[in-house]
Amino acid sequence: MSSRKPPEGPFPYPTHPDWAEHLYEAIINTCADENLVPVPRRAVLEALAPALGAGEAKRVIENRRDGRVLKATAYHVEGRDSNDALLLLNAALHGASTLPWWLNDRMRSNWLHPTPDNLARFEELVAQERTVARAKTAVERAKAAQRALAATATTAEKDAAVAAVTAAQDDLARAEQELAAQERALGKRRPLPTVRAAAEDGILRAALASTPVTSDVAAAIQRYTVGTLRDRGKLRSYDLVESLVQEGQRDAAVVVLQQTPMIDRDGEHFDVWRAFHVTGNNRGDCRLQIFGLAAEHLLTGVPQPLLLLPEEPENRRLLLRGLGEILRRLSIRLNTEYASSQRDPEGRAVRARRIADVPARVVVGARTPERLEAALRDLNVHDHLRGQLVYDNEDRGLGLWSTLVKAYQGEGLLGELLAKEVAKNRVPAMALDEASIADALVGAGPLEPLAVLLTPGEEITALTLRDMAIRCTTVLLFPPVPPRPKVLPERAPMPTGRYWPIVRATLQEAPWSQQNGSKAKRRTEVWAAVVAQHFVNRGNLLAMDGAFTAHNVQFGVSPDPRSLSSLRAACLAGNTAAWEILVRRHLLPGLVNAPEPFITPGQGSEKGADRKGVRRTPANAVLALVHAFTSPPPGVTRELLRAFATAVLETPEVVSGVKGLAPGTFWAPDAHGMPQEDVLADKAWYDATFPRVTSDRSESAASEGQRSSRDAESPDQMEERSKEVEEEVEEDAHTRMTRLRGELPGQLAQSREGIKTAVEDLKALVELIQDAVAARQEAGALEEPGQMQKAYVIELIAAKEHSAQITSRLDQAIAAVMEL
């Protein structure tokens, strides 16, 4: 390090170590005053202090007799009265000191769940990327050697050079083919890195720490993050890089300090502290582009030749890892360039001048460190959902989902609902680790915490855990709603229980009494986005259209109490109802999110030349598979159905496919359930094996109002045949009949569910009374006073009269249906 004084200029230099210690002291004392947990000392010294702009440490600190604290104008507390309260330091940071965060919810759909299989595939892919890089270098060297041959070289030497180039190119082609296959095995996505609260001296602090990975994997994660952000940034109507060059950055982004433990290629363990963007990720990436730095280098180490100082020898094996050293070298180079009288007006120093330092809100304290990541994601989701950024439907659904899970947690109902509806009270709610289960459901952690919800005796596998995650997703998005109390006045609002209002508030829906068709469509879209994250390959969200109905929104979806293996066993025994549940709730995600999807939207978005099978609604494709159990088409047997269901459930978990097949695909089964080699199970085979159900009435009942005629007419044709008149058209008898017939299935299902619930409540009442009698006799206590017994009898007689009315009404309905 040179002892010469660095040149003056707009680009700041790292904070002096003494002021870094003063800043940490001020943070510690301020957090104590606010009853918050501070950040670790290393995070301040290694990530925050070096990144502060010129004079920022002195500006934000106030000296008192009892010690240093942060000035009141230099910080604020976000969510002061909540458990997710955060202490944010308002300061100016060096423009090149922060990194894009991979947990940005605007690109959440581009990440996979961090399952062991996905992590193993990712490590193999990173190793293959290095192989491809070495192969490219070999090709370049072979070509350079060929060009370096003298004109007087012998024919043998020239032939050898040509052969060397050809061999190197062949090796590169094979390596690239293998890399492409591994990309497909991951669905061209990456497993989401997991983070947790960082610890100091065994105590959790207000910073994050990622799981240890190799430096190559860490660099690959950062490259993928940046590449995805830039792809999404192309949707902007302006050039963000040029906007920052011309106007600078006005809004303060939220950043969090994070520790990244890594293992170098030579086996050395090291870790770095960096500030990661929670909001403003695109701006952070664009700033690094302007400064000429790569995000992966800023994390794993900047090659010394990229920040070479004047009169310093070049060392191509030296990596600069200290943030202070990196920023010091960068500022020296840019200040030197900026002070030059012959500076380039389009040079880096001039272009980066307006972002030499930028406003930021740094997380330096938290009330609940173990909830830090969830609190930060909430800020990120809110910034995207309520902002003006372009947000894909899948990312929007995942953002709403994480907000919904957090809302259940905030109300203390997440464990209660899952224990009651998914585990069927086999596990008490208090025994569930809500934090780990929430992380598993939103994709921020592994699925193993869901194993406690499995039926006793059920094997814990990737398949059963994924199926349990889907069951939990279903019940959280479609929570049960208790039936309307009979004593409730006719015009009184419907009491929807404790769970439905949480979903309504999160998704910002209309009241329960209003039309539920739009609610069903929106909730189904969120469900489809969440479910797709459990599969390597993502299907179109519209392929799930019709999976849930307005009735499911109004009264909820209760998962089948049987385990997946028990449900499959019931299907083998010929249980028709079990088969329908298996198809609609357990096979459907695999049918849509397969490498060769069996169910597609069937709309104009499909490419005509690439489309397989016939174009039909998703509801019809599902209905055809359901009907095949009782009314099988030619060539379809129970053995075929069993083999097909098994393959759809289990094949996505196979890391390496069968020879001749891509991972996740399989040969179509024959009538005996045996695979037919060279017959790929895809949409064309599916549509030929399970042809379209032509009964409009059956499809109408299954999808509650969706008509197959939507396939035959495009939206443009429907608009041409439509006309809005000034007066309402009177409804004739035939139209009224059609409308009422369409409403009948939903009303019938609603009544059946209400009666079923009443029977279950009466059963519980009888058991309660019998248990109370047995307890009284065991205790030798006196009977209940006569007045109380009389009051109970009056209530039971009234209920019996109501049950008689139910029987009478059902008899009337049966008689009327016979004339329908």
Image (cartoon, rainbow, N blue to C red):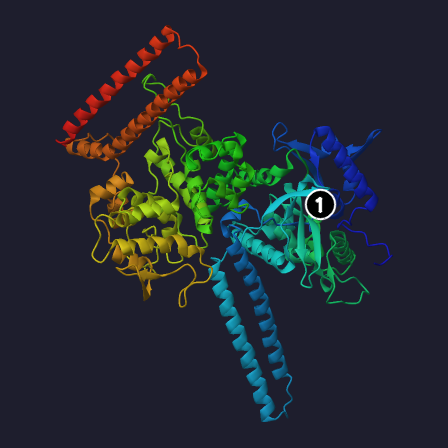
Q: Mark 1 is on which residue type?
A: Leu
Placement of the C terminus among the 4 image quadrants? top left
Looking at the image, residue 155 lies above or below residue 621: below
Q: Quadrant of the N terminus?
A: bottom right
Is residue 159 or residue 424 the one in the foreground? 424
**Relative depth, front residue between 318 and 765:** 765
Image: 346 above or below 553: below
- Say whether residue 583 is visible: no
Q: Quadrant of residue 456?
A: top left
User: In x, y percent, where is residue 141?
Assistant: 62, 77
Residue position for label 1: 93
Of all residues shown, which one is farthest toward the right? 3
What residue is drawn where x is 46% and y is 62%?
A: 656
- Which residue shows up at 69% across the image and 53% down it? 352
Does residue 712 appear anywhere in the picture? yes
Q: Is residue 511 above or below residue 177?
A: above
**How crowded is the residue under tag 1: few (<14 C-alpha within 10 Å), some, or many (20+)?**
many
The residue tagged with tag 1: helix, strand or loop? strand
- How many numbered callouts? 1
Q: Where does the image place residue 446, in percent across and percent down from the top left?
A: 53, 47
Quadrant in the rendering for residue 458: top left
* 767 sits left or right of 462 in the view: left
Q: Residue 54, how many percent across, how many down?
A: 77, 45
Residue at left offset 49%, top offset 58%: 186
Judge by depth and name the residue closer to the eye, 582 or 168.
582
